[in-house]
Image (cartoon, rainbow, N blue to C red):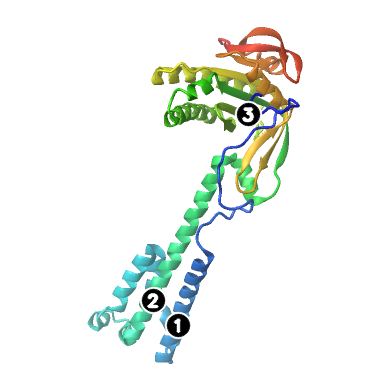
């Protein structure tokens, strides 16, 4: 039974790559324990309040507003420099000698830092440390959010990832005109029995990375890789009028990439490529391991074009041929018997026409 096939001949889409994200469709993949965040926030609030109350008790005629003069350096240093910076800056402020304060000629600051004694110094250090802790927590949260967003972009198209973050739930779209490509490495199973697992994965990763670069260059969408099969679509999730041309050009460059790979690695790999154009349904599956997939008869036919194709050649349907015939050269293959579809006329894509 071939790639993605069922007994009834329908393409099922196969399994998906095991990308894992911590979190669900609500997009909350942060790894900082809530108790830790709450504890540090309480420490910040408690330190600030305690310091202001202490100053007010010691100097009731001055009022709590004067305490802000001492808190400001500690808060700024903690916010900018984090825990270590806030702690160090607060210690320096708290331990300033009285003669130096006298040179400042700022009576409120002298009163705050020079006359509160050891207890005031301790509280000022605590404020700086708490501000630093709060800053560190904020940086950790920001880093974790960026990491989660990047992981999501590795699995889903950017526009779909943004929709998931804004509107958690089912995503399903109908696209009336797209072009789908399947490419399979010929006799890869036999190769896998002759080389070590590490070498096999290294080879496959290098070749598929070359394909990934081509996908990005032509602004297509890689749907998945299953074993040694590579699936790409043009016109999804963002519609574009030239998707048949973009996918056809990509297919031709895939064959060129395999030639370069064989020269670099001293191998004799070959590709069998199939392309079809038509409507599909696209959507996201999963809640913790996401996958963006396609369904419909066009997917089935594209898969059949590959599996019923010829090594080293790109087989396309009549619908795709009609969209490309003015810009590319073809060889008519004729009628072939396609599983689940019966007799179909197909063409081989040869290359671009000279301008």
Q: CA distance from mark 2 to mark 3?
A: 58 Å
The residue shown at (71%, 15%) is 318
Query: Up-down: is 352 above or below 302?
Result: above
Callout 2–callout 1 Cβ contact below 8 Å: yes
Which numbered marker is on residue 233?
3
Residue assigned mark 2: 126
Residue assigned mark 1: 50
The image shows residue 144 at horizontal and vertical percentages of 49, 54
In primary-sequence order, the first of circles 2 and 3 is 2
Q: Is residue 59 in sight in this rendering?
A: no
In primary-sequence order, the first of circles 2 and 1 is 1
Left or right: residue 86 compared with residue 306: left
The image shows residue 212 at horizontal and vertical percentages of 51, 30
Which numbered marker is on residue 326?
none
Left or right: residue 169 compared with residue 151: right
- Along the viewing direction, whichever of 1 and 292 lies nearer the viewer: 1
Q: Secondary structure at mark 2?
A: helix
Query: Up-down: is 26 above or below 83?
Result: above
Q: Which image quadrant: the N terminus?
A: top right
Q: CA distance from mark 1 to mark 3?
A: 62 Å
Residue closest to the far left: 99
Q: Which image quadrant: the C terminus?
A: top right
Callout 2–callout 3 Cβ contact below 8 Å: no
């Amino acid at each position: 039974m071939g790639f993605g096939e069922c007994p009834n001949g329908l393409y099922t889409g196969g399994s998906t790559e095991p990308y894992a994200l911590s979190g669900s469709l609500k997009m909350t993949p942060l790894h900082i324990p809530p108790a830790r965040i709450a504890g540090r926030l309480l420490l910040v609030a408690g330190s600030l309040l305690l310091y202001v109350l202490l100053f007010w008790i010691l100097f009731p005629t001055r009022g709590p507003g004067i305490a802000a003069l001492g808190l400001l350096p500690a808060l700024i240093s903690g916010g900018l420099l984090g825990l270590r910076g806030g702690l160090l800056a607060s210690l320096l402020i708290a331990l300033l000698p009285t003669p130096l304060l006298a040179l400042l000629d700022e009576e409120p600051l002298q009163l705050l830092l020079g006359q509160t004694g050891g207890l005031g110094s301790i509280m000022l250090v605590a404020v700086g440390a708490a501000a630093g802790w709060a800053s560190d927590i904020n940086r950790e949260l920001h880093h974790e959010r960026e990491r989660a967003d990047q992981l999501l972009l590795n699995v889903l198209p950017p526009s779909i990832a943004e929709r998931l973050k804004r509107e958690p739930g089912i995503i399903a779209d109908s696209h009336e005109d797209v072009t789908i490509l399947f490419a399979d490495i010929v006799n890869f199973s036999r190769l896998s029995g002759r080389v070590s697992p590490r070498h096999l994965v290294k080879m496959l990763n290098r070749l598929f990375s070359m394909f990934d670069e081509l996908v990005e260059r032509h602004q297509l969408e890689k749907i998945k890789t299953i074993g040694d099969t590579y699936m790409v679509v043009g016109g999804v999730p963002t519609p574009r009028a030239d998707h048949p041309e973009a996918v056809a050009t990509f297919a031709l460059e895939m064959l060129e990439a395999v030639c370069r790979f064989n020269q670099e690695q001293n191998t004799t790999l070959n590709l069998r490529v199939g392309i079809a154009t038509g409507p599909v349904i696209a959507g996201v599956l999963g809640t913790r391991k996401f996958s963006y997939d396609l369904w419909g008869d066009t997917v089935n036919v594209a898969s059949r074009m590959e599996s019923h194709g010829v090594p080293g050649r790109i087989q396309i349907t009549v619908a795709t041929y009609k969209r490309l015939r003015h810009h590319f050269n073809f060889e008519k293959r004729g009628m072939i018997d396609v599983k689940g579809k019966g007799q179909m006329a197909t063409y081989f894509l040869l290359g671009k026409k000279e301008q």
